Image (cartoon, rainbow, N blue to C red):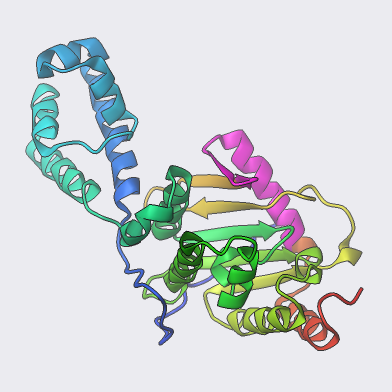
Amino acid sequence: MSTPPARQPAGQSGAGGPAAAPAGRSPLMRRQRLATELHQLRVDAGLTLDEVAGKLECSSAKVSRMETGQVAVRIQDARELLDLYAVGNARRDLLLQMVRQARGKAWWSAYDDVLDDSSQTLLSLENEASSILVYEASGVPALLQVADYAEALHSELLEPQDRRLVELRLARQQILDRPGGLALTAVIDEAALRRRVGGNEVMRTQIDHLIASSRKPGIDLRLLPFSSGPHQAMGFSFQIFDFSDDASRLVHLDLLGRAQVSESTVEIRRYREAFEQVHADALGEDESRDFLRMLSEEGPGHA
C-alpha cells in the first residue's frame, strides 16, 4: 500500500482571523527538545540525577523535571549543566539559544485561560509540524471548520470561555496559509458530514468551505464514502504529525477530550497503515469535491 504523496505547503493568503498565528518554533516543542538534549548529555557524562543535583545544589526532582520538559530551564541552570557536562562552545551556544527560545511565549498564550496542557501540546505539534495526516470519523477536522460549525459544537455551553475556544480554533487555521506552512492531508468519513451540526444551512456553509479548501495547493482532502466498506480505523479519529528537521513522527488521539500522544514506533506504524488504507479507499480529490457538492445540494442530513 503506497504512502499518500507529500503536498507542498500553501502560500500566504489574505484570510484574516481573530488572532495572529505567526510562523516560528513553539516554545513547548523547544522545551521538549532541550529536555531530550540535557538528558542525553547527562547520560553521556555518566552521571546520575543525584550526582547532578549535588553539583547544582538542588533536588534531583528539579533535574528530572528539566530533563522531561515539565519546567522551563533557567539560563543560569543551563550554564551550570553545560559546564558540568563539558559541552564545547558551538553546541553550548546552540543549546543556550534553545533555552532562551523555550522560555518565550507562544502565539496562543493569549488564550491561556481556556487551554489545558493537552491543548497546548496539540497546538505545539501543529505549529512545529511540516505535515499532518488526519482521519476524522465523526466530525470536520478542526483546521477546516468554519465559525458557525465550531460555535455549534459548543452550543450547549454559552459561557464566555467557550466563545474564546471558537476564536482559538479559527486562529489555529492560519497555519495553513502562512509562508512555509504545513501540508495537510485529510480523510473525512461520510458519517461526519451526514451528521447535522447546527442545522442544514451551517452544514452547507461548512461543506462549501471544504470544497474551497480542497483547492488549496497545500491541502489534500478526500471523502471516505459508506460504500468503501469496513476498514482498520472505523470509529477512531487520529492525526499523524511529521517533522521535517529530524524525521520524527507522532500520533495524536483525542479520546473524549483526553488527548494522548504516542511516539511508539509500533503504534505509529499501525496508525500509518490505517491512514494509508482509508486514503486509498477514499474517493479521489475531484470525486470528493463532486460528492461534497452533492451533499451540499441535497442537504447533509439526507440519507
Taking 167 as reference, is 37 left or right? left
Q: Position of residue 217 (x, y in %)?
A: 53, 79
Quadrant where the image shows the N terminus = bottom right
Q: Nearer the viewer, residue 3 or 31?
A: 31
Magenta span includes 272: yes
In this rendering, is residue 181 above or below 274?
below
Query: At 59% across and 70% down in the image, what residue appears?
Result: 151
Q: Nearer the viewer, residue 266 or 138?
A: 138
In this rendering, is residue 58 above or below 209?
above
Q: Nearer the viewer, residue 266 or 114?
A: 114
Q: Quadrant of residue 109?
A: bottom left
Q: Position of residue 140 (x, y in %)?
A: 66, 67
Query: At 24% across and 23% down in the image, what residue appears?
Result: 62
Quadrant where the image shows the C terminus = bottom right
Taking 33 as reference, is 217 left or right? right
Which residue occupies the extreme front position in the image? 159
Q: Position of residue 49 (x, y in %)?
A: 25, 15
Chain part drawn in magenta = 254-279
Q: Position of residue 156 (x, y in %)?
A: 65, 62
For residue 97, say whether it is visible.
yes
In this rendering, is residue 2 above or below 17?
above
Taking 232 as reference, is 118 left or right? left
